[in-house]
Image (cartoon, helix red, strand yellow):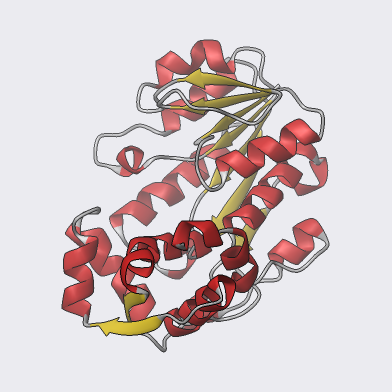
Amino acid sequence: MIVVTGATGNIGRPLTQALTEAGRQVTAVSRHTTAVPDGAVHVVADLAEPSGLKPVLAGAKALFLLLSGDLHAAGASPADIIGEAAAGGVRRIVLLSTLGVATRPFGPTRIAMRALENTLRESGLEWTVLRPGGFASNALWWAESVRAQQVVAAPFGDVGVPIIDPADIAAVAAACLLDDRHTGGVYELTGPEVITPRQQAKAIAAALGSPIRFHELTRDEAKAAMAQSMPAELADDTLDILGSPSPAELRVSPDVQRALGRAPRPFADWAARNVAAFR
């Protein structure tokens, strides 16, 4: 049996689907009751209370570990989840980390994530670490303005990074959970090309078959909007990356190809599959 945390999100849901289609028993874990793909068992649990995971992890052979935002906060103990997994007999953990661990290693969140990576390496379990860059699904931030005004509003309109389709992250995670060859691997996951917000807007317009206007926000305007849903420090950190990506953040990684034997999907594919959100 494989336990998938964050099972209702942009990565966890397609991962659960892929594992059930591969014939595996899957326990899909989330904080709230929700529908999960056919063949999976859903369990409501809170990763912020690792001891409560004991019945979920008992008898599991593998775990996909995705941390919610509060598990990055001061005082959180995500390493305890690894301890509970080992105690419950889990043999393999695939950890969703972040590319920032390598490209911007000194922020508090990334220091904590690197420490968690190290805890996993030293746990005695089989492990794989996934380090994705920016997600294509972040474009859903624009869905409301596209529906209401046919506008995408974003900062740094002509500065791009190689964002990745979350479904590709899920596919790599499935491969790592199912195949011993990926044990001990660290995969940096990006899309196939650098793409700017203005180009993303054009791709969404093409998927819709109708024009979209691009409105470039100032950094301050963008920070004010982002601060409504994340700490100001994280908003600044994100804007630093979006406005001035480092060479490492501009690099198109070969690791999706290495893990899956195919290239990562371009943003246009994500936009076409998710076009209903923008109608």
Horizontal relation, residue 200 to residue 172: left or right:
left
Horizontal relation, residue 89 to residue 221: left or right:
right
The quarter holding residue 223 reads: bottom left
- In the image, residue 178 sits, relative to residue 149, either above or below, namely above
- Seen at 41% across and 25% down, the residue is 32
- In the image, residue 26 sits, relative to residue 144, either above or below, namely above
- Seen at 35% across and 27% down, the residue is 48
- In the image, residue 208 sits, relative to residue 78, either above or below, namely below
Viewer-nearest residue: 54 or 270: 270
Viewer-nearest residue: 52 or 128: 52
Residue 154 x %, y %: 32, 76
Horizontal relation, residue 111 to residue 188: left or right:
left
Residue 238 x %, y %: 33, 67
- Seen at 37% across and 76% down, the residue is 242
Residue 96 x %, y %: 54, 47
Viewer-nearest residue: 239 or 16: 16
Horizontal relation, residue 268 to residue 259: left or right:
left
Residue 89 x %, y %: 65, 17
Viewer-nearest residue: 146 or 140: 146
The quarter holding residue 94 reads: top right
- In the image, residue 63 sits, relative to residue 259, either above or below, namely above
Please state the total of marks drawn on the protein image: 0
Residue sticking out furthest to the bottom: 158
Q: Is residue 81 visible?
A: yes
- Seen at 24% across and 41% down, the residue is 74
Q: Is residue 156 visible?
A: no
